Amino acid sequence: MVTRRMTRQREAILEAIRSAGGPLSVAEVHRVAGREIEGLGIATVYRNLRNLRDEGMIVAVELPGEDPRYEPVGRGHHHHFLCTECERTFDLEGCPVDVPEGATLPGGYRVRGHSLTFYGSCERCSEV
């Protein structure tokens, strides 16, 4: 694995992801990191996201029907809430499903992991 040099652009992109309260879309990363780096190009964001993912510093979060979003590694097991109003995604602490890895479900399905995405209105959008 090749570790690339930490440029100002790369640092701003990684900081945008680390400081977010949930996984960010490419457009959100571009907007947040662009506040720090004037003239930050979308191609630079895509390239750095790919490299940061390949180096194991961030992970892609796949939500059904959505483009990938990105968050730092090491956040532990958690789930996500997608606001259908503002389209922001939030991390949810804890796990409402008590199905341990290795469990067998009815039908003989062996669990290796799981992810849940909840949909609705976030607190801010619910107030409107």
Image (spheres, rainbow, N blue to C red):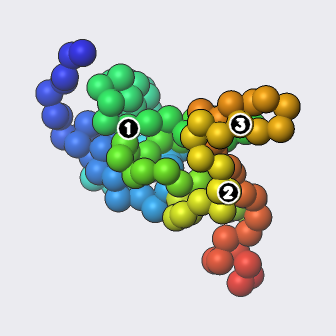
Give the mark nearer the N terminus: 1 vs 3: 1
Residue occupied by mark 2: 97
- Where residue 57 appears, x then y in whole percent? 31, 36
Furthest residue in direction right, as rendered: 107
Q: Is residue 76 above or below residue 122?
A: above
Q: Nearer the viewer, residue 33 or 101?
A: 101
Which structural element holds mark 3? strand
What residue sits 47% from the left and 41% below the top? 70
User: Residue at (67%, 57%) from the top-left corner?
Assistant: 97
- Give the structural element (helix, strand or loop) at label 2: loop
The front one of 106 and 46 is 106
Number of other residues with Cα within 10 Å of mark 3, as a class: few under 14, some 14 to 19, many 20 or more: few
Kindly report which numbered mark, 3 or 2, lies closer to the viewer in this rendering. Answer: 3
Q: Which of marks 2 and 3 precedes in the sequence?
A: 2
Q: Amino acid at mark 1?
A: Ile
- Amino acid tagged 2: Val
Q: Residues within 10 Å of mark 1 (few under 14, many from 20)?
A: many
Mark 3: amino acid: Thr
Q: Nearer the viewer, mark 1 or mark 2?
A: 2
Residue in the image at 65% along x and 56% along y: 98
Quickly name the residue at label 3. 104
Q: Which residue is mark 1?
A: 58
Residue 69 shows in this picture: yes
